Amino acid sequence: MKRILITGGAGFIGSTLANFYSKEHKVTVIDDLSMGSISNLDSSANLCFIEGSVTDRELMEKVLSKTQFDYIFHLAAIASVADSVARPLETHQINFDSVFQLLELVKNNQFELKRLLFASSAAVYGDEPTLPKQEESVIRPLTPYAIDKFAAEKYVVDYYHLYGVPTSAVRFFNVYGPKQNPESPYSGVISIMMDRYKKLLNKEAIDFTVFGDGTQSRDFVFIEDVIQALDLIATSQDSLGEVYNIGTGKAINLNELVSIVDNFLGINLPICYEDERSGDIKHSLADISKVTEIGYEPNYTVKTGLEKYVSYELNNLNGEDSKK
Ligand code: NAD
Ligand code: UD1
């Protein structure tokens, strides 16, 4: 039984990972619940939840000096690009300072660690137009979020080369699936879109706001494929000190996304087009050859992933209705 620490473990990706590992391993989750929720976590004797901030040095030192972990996944962050543009200083403390602090605490306290895995982002590539993005492509971070992710990722990798701390970093492209919180205006676009479909099915008068003309495209990757990639990277020896893209290798634009779900549900989601957001990237697409070399193979296309996500939400909706 391994001991695993997941920061941001009540959030979308973190809780899915925590529920996956807690079936067989001891998992500790630290989350300040700013975006995450305890209800995302399965009730399991293997899961220990600590409410607190990764910026709290005393708390982090206490946790890291008390238990020797096998794996640490540092996922806690303000995940919104647009929020970082609105609040650069606050987001910097979480998205960069907490990583640097964690690296120091790990170097000084964790002696059995097999891997510290850091969640970086495709946002580091910015708007340089060459696609698909390889890990060695031009890096042009355009926002405080992307700058923080890139700087943090560099430190993470450097701590392996300089001090032997076993680290890897991943650049997630656009992850979607159950448990992604749609409540903030800065939430991931598919979670917001799904929320609008649910409201439409509930006969509420809504529309879905698209910033720009909807032709911006992303490499949307389903959460289950992300969990597969994280587990492979954390347990591979080849990935020590390395950075990996995690996506599907295919991109789709927002208008096309809506048509897939419209067709699947047989309804039309009303769309309201507004000005594009500043700092927004037009097109994003991953080259996933590097992670494929260690055994990763996405099991979902955006169509099959969306259909699974929609079916999950519909089941929940029906469950809620039958409780009424
Ligand atoms: P999320 O917002 O659902 O999860 C982040 C979690 O961190 C939340 O539960 C939040 O409450 C928690 N958190 C925020 N500030 C904290 C703090 N100071 N202390 C402790 N916990 C804190 O987002 P997610 O989509 O699950 O993203 C996880 C990680 O992956 C983030 O680092 C994000 O930047 C990165 N990422 C996500 C995507 C994506 O498409 N979802 C893409 C690229 C990178
Ligand atoms: C997302 C992630 C970010 C990650 C990056 C990697 C979130 C909140 N953001 O950023 O953590 O690092 O992928 O590629 O998980 N849009 C709308 N209407 C909406 C919301 C968004 O049109 O209601 C548009 C945005 O302007 C953007 C696109 O949809 O053009 C995607 O936005 P978003 O889901 O926030 O993702 P990214 O900015 O790509």
Image (cartoon, rainbow, N blue to C red):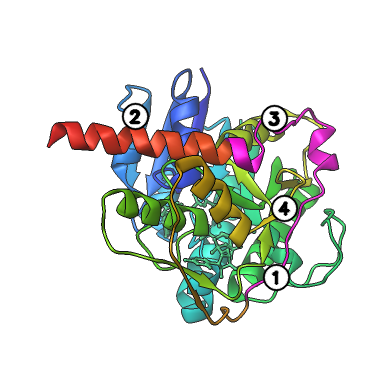
In the rendered structure, which amino acid carries the disc numbered 4?
Ala
* Mark drawn on residue 42: 2
Task: Please give the name of the residue rendered at 57% of the width and 52% of the height, measured from the top-left corner.
Answer: 259
Q: Is residue 282 magenta?
A: yes
Q: Nearer the viewer, residue 245 or 30?
A: 245
Which residues are drawn in magenta? 280-304
Which kind of residue does numbered mark 3 sit on? Answer: Leu
Alpha-carbon span between mark 3 and mark 1: 30 Å
Give the alpha-carbon distance from disc 1 to disc 2, as whole Å.
Answer: 37 Å
Q: Does the magenta run of residues contain 230?
A: no
Q: How many marks?
A: 4
Toward which corner of the image does residue 139 lie, by quadrant? bottom right
The image shows residue 194, relative to residue 308, as above or below, that is below
Q: Which mark is residue 282?
A: 1
Residue wearing tag 4:
251
The amino acid marked with disc number 1 is Lys
Q: CA distance from mark 4 to mark 1?
A: 12 Å
Q: Give the overall secondary structure of the magenta segment.
A: loop
Q: Is mark 1 within 8 Å of ligand 2?
A: no
